[in-house]
Amino acid sequence: MNSISIQAPRAGVLVRRGRRRVGRGLPAALALLPTALVVLVVYVGCMLWTVRLSFTGSTLLPRYDWVGFAQYVRLFANDRFLTSAGNIVIFGILFITGCLILGFLLAVFIDQNVRGEGVLRTIFLYPYAMSFIVTGVAWQWFLNPGLGLQKLMRDTGFPGFTFDWLVNPDMAIYTIVIAGIWHGAGLTMAILLAGLRGVDSDLWKAARVDGVPAWRYYLSVVLPLLRPMVVTATVLLATGVVKLYDLVVAMTLGGPGISTEVPAKFVMDHLFERNNIGLGTAAATIMLIAVVSILAPWVYARYVREEGGRV
Amino acid sequence: MLSRTCVPVLALALVWSTGAAAQQYKAEVLHWWTSAGESAAVKVFADAFAKAGGTWVDNAIAGGINARAAAINRMVGGNPPTMAQFNTGKQFDELVSNELLRDVDAQAQAGKWRDLMPKAIVEAITRDGKAYAVPVNVHGQNWLFYNTKIFADAGLDPPRTFPELLETGEKLKARGVIPLALGGQPNWEHNLFRAVLVGQAGADVFRGVYGTRDPAVAKGARFKEAAEIFGRMRALVDPGSPGRNWNDAASLVITNKAAMHFNGDWAKGEFVAAGQTAGKEYGCTIVGESGGLVIGGDVFVFPATGDKAVLAAQDRLAGILLDPDAQIEFSKRKGSIPVRMDLDVSSMDACARKAHDVLRDPANQIEAMELLSIPNFSGAMQDAVTQYWNTPGMPAEAFVDKVVAAMRDAG
């Protein structure tokens, strides 16, 4: 998402310059052409095809009849899809805020010139190097009441200790959030740490002279300076939210019951397991609409308004 | 589960690497038999084919869904394998209606398939009076595996009906064992529900729900009774069940922690791997008044082709798959029973012999959900069952409503 929205206007700029200075602009435009074509044909083309299929009664193979909004009516009467939609909102909000807060704290912590910084940085970033499948399986074991944390605590002398979120339909989605934050906080830390290193140390000295407490300095001075990094981290984390699938498959398989189902899994199951392309593509279209409606104001603010203001 | 991510890559690599031109008796076989027992089983066919002078190109793709998707994509794309595995049932319906499969009716008539195989299996491979797939085995899906030691220690007999099972379960629970080991994933919860439905409400109700999708059956007293018993079975499962893999559930029975486990006969592989023998450390039985066995199985389909060399290879393969020795040896390793009912199964284990005996009576042959139902409805049922199972306060009436809604949606 990020790369598309960033590349598109630049290509336009290059083409415009190319008209003035053909010798320099044309090769660049030519070099960008394949990417632009791939984006247009593969991404946009497949999106349109998906939307078209969502208005058909396709089952195993695509069919090109027209059933109107029948699939959408079924979709919004479907318990599982509604649960999925609710879950992705819960996960999205908690995961992104959780990663940002934890990542920021870790970055500030590492920025204190602690000893063994390299080792700590590696440890914190390490979870991100693991696939969601490994993360999911590991956390499934760790949180399983009969195998992991609960059993460990009970065996070591706390017989009343209970932590059964993983098998509790009301709480299971939060275990996915925990595993997700564990996985994503390190990356957020790395991005924010890079930003912290760019903050002029004179600012800190000035703040000290003015008697500003450390927490106030980070909150009111450093955090605003880190805005571009926070935006980058948020965008990266948000893509993780939209495509959330493998973590759920590895950790809970959508269970207990349907309590941890997510939209991407709904789409995958209906496309490939249940031979229901019509319903699956309808769900995919709803996901697309949701993403676009969140992204559109941002793209508008970032590119359209800024460019309009400058010219 | 690890395989989920690497499978598409692997599949792609295999698809790219196996696009070579067909030679005499060269057969590329696409299947999803990747576990130790399964690959030993498929090797029986591969060896027999090699002995007959063929070259068997093994294209194993982990995970049935992935393998079927790969097979379908390649057939639609015009570069099909020589032979592809499917489950008996509706998975290849649209391939037949789009004329992507070769009909094997000549082989079926020559081999007297209609006399030798269970009727449900023959019907499941037949479309418009013609056979379109070669069945290779029969799997029973509603077996109760039980730990003989736990039952002997408790002085109890394995239950014969589901009300009895509830009673027995409570007694076992009082003794501190897990009465029922369940892999708490939606498809295994659904498998358990089907075992209860067929055992308690009978084959007609089972067919009425999954086959004809008759709302009147779902609203009937017998369906509701089965649903209530299923609901009461929640109390027999340990709290660690949600999310558990089926093989971990089976291993609870193997290690004397749990008394009973419902599963298909493929679970035998776990007992065998642990060095246990059917009838000794563990037993298998069918619960329910009807005593019917829910059967499905594996088939191979031959993608349609005009290439004479491929056709010849396919003919040869069809013969090998149903060869008596290969049938027995394959099923021994796979945990299934031969699809040919005329074979001598005395060399097989106690559970397989029992299955063979039960299936001799056609009244006991109950076609599995995969044979009766379209995947769309099966999936919707699975959602309904897993919701019901995991919501302890949910009354059976609410579950019935969900089932009726699923029937209406499936059309």
Image (tube, rainbow, N blue to C red):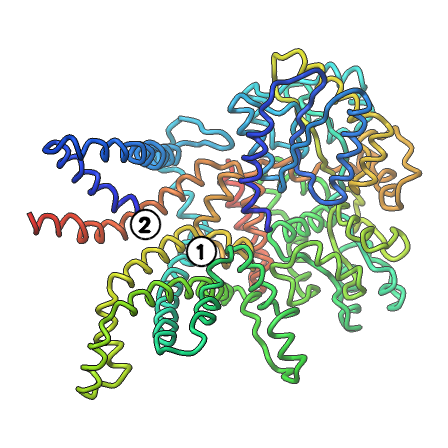
Residue B254 in sight here:
yes
Residue at x-position 58% and y-position 64%: B392
Count every numbered label the image shows and give the total: 2
Which label belongs to residue A252?
none
Q: Amino acid at mark 2?
A: Ala
The residue at 78%/60% (across/down) is B253
Residue pointed to by mark 2: A290
Q: Is residue B282 above or below residue B34?
A: below
What residue does disc 1 label? A83
Q: Residue at x 59, y 51 (%)?
A: B2
Residue at mark 2: chain: A
Instruction: Please tell me which of labels 2 and 1 falls first in the chain.
Output: 1
Instruction: Give coordinates of residue A232: x percent, y percent.
Output: 30, 58
Residue A310 left/right relative to B218: left
Q: Secondary structure at mark 2?
A: helix
Q: Nearer the viewer, residue B24 or B230?
A: B24
Badge 1: chain ID: A
| Residue shown at the point (64%, 76%) measured from the top left | A152
Tell me where residue A147 appears, x and y as whole percent: 65, 69
Q: Is residue A311 left or right of residue B137?
A: left
Q: Amino acid at mark 1?
A: Thr
Q: Is residue B204 above or below residue B85?
A: below
